[in-house]
Amino acid sequence: MDKARRSHPLARLFGSFLRLGITSFGGPAMIAYIRRMAVEQKQWLDHESFEDGVALCQTIPGATAMQMAAYTGLKIRGARGAVASYVAFGLPAFLLMLMLSFAYSRTHGLPAVVSAFSGLQAVIVSVVANATLSFGKTSLKNWKSVVIALIAAALFGLMADPVLILLLAALLGVLLNRSGPAANKTSHATRIEHTTFPILLLLFASAAGFVVLFFLRKDLFDLATLMSRIDLMAFGGGFASVPLMFHEVVQVRSWMDAPTFLNGIVLGQFTPGPIVITATFVGFLVCGLPGAVVATIAIFLPSFVIVLGVAPYFDRVRTSPWFTGAIAGVLSSFVGLLLAVTVRFALHVHWDWRHLALGAGALVALLLKLDILWVVLAGTAISVLAF
């Protein structure tokens, strides 16, 4: 069975995920479409293998749908398959975001554009608020997780170091969520080959790239370092990266103001792929085309390496009560982070009755499970006509 799966050409794997990436609106919701393609239509994976991948990608940092693309490719064709599927799935979002960032840099002063983004900032507040509610429903399982979330929200509100907050949350998760080891799962047919050599190769290439940037372009080195750090802390999916990015880019480094960053998130909603593609927008506005490329690679590479490194050993790691407790604490802290960022975003919107009505309508639509793309498109039309 494994041999049959691995007989699929890399070009076919790349093409399949490229087609899927073109229509990958909805972020984590795209996991269902990856499942349909890989399990039901092409039968590359069995159901149990795919579910193990979902559990893995929800546990490690990074954009969940992107991680699942890498995991699927890894199971089918090893490390080369992971690279092919990962790049193909994210490429359409990068190219479209690059074009939108270029257009934004040339046209954001036009009256219609200003009106659209003014209204859409209220929509984005609703998007983040909805994410806070939905993420809280799945992550806050008891009063202990609520306590961790509130502590994290307060610390993020005080602009404490995100790394220290995450470490504190992990420690509290271990202390407050003591439990026995998880039940061992039976192994299934599709095993993942060891990926030591590809990981070492990627780490060497990454280190070389950082050294080159340090000596030739210190601004790009700082950008790459920041985006890599954000990716490594983004437990809970790609949406977790946005509040961290806002904290670092707007509040700590002042590379752009809050309304501009919110506009970048808006543009991200018009593209397929994960919301973390906002990194492309940030990189373009800070350092032009080289910045867009460097920021995009840096925001995706660390979590990709983690997928390669952890996947072969995940069944053993996930049975540790220390590990599950720490992850529970980190996920709870991100509810607090999203809550804090919802408040911060809201403070940068000039609220009047039109913004309030648009924001409330967007939140109701999202709570009713209307696709986020239609919410943003409707918000754009209303903004242009009414603002």
Image (spheres, rainbow, N blue to C red):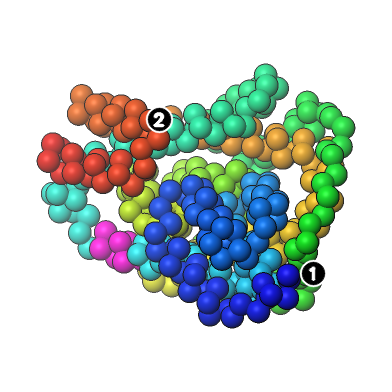
CA gap between label 2 and label 1 equals: 42 Å
Viewer-nearest residue: 181 or 283? 181
Amino acid marked by disc 1? His
Within the image, what quadrant is residue 215 found in? bottom right
Within the image, what quadrant is residue 141 found in? top right
Residue found at the very far top of the displayed protein: 143
> For mark 2, what is the residue?
367
Amino acid marked by disc 2? Leu
**Can residue 235 be seen by looking at this rendering?**
yes
Q: Secondary structure at mark 1?
A: loop
Viewer-nearest residue: 309 or 247? 309
Q: Which mark is residue 194?
A: 1
Q: Secondary structure at mark 2?
A: helix
Q: Is residue 327 above or below residue 23?
A: above
Q: Residue at x 53, y 62 (%)?
A: 41
Q: Position of residue 171 (x, y in %)?
A: 77, 35
* Quadrant in the picture for the N terminus: bottom right
**Can residue 336 be seen by looking at this rendering?**
no
Q: Is residue 295 above or below residue 79?
A: above
Q: Residue at x 13, y 36 (%)?
A: 386
* Quadrant in the picture for the C terminus: top left
Q: Position of residue 297 (x, y in %)?
A: 53, 67
Reading the chain from its start, which is encountered first: label 2 or label 1? Answer: 1
Q: Position of residue 380 (x, y in %)?
A: 22, 44
Q: Which mark is residue 241?
A: none
Q: Residue at x 43, y 72 (%)?
A: 290
Q: Residue at x 56, y 55 (%)?
A: 35
> Residues in magenta?
98-104
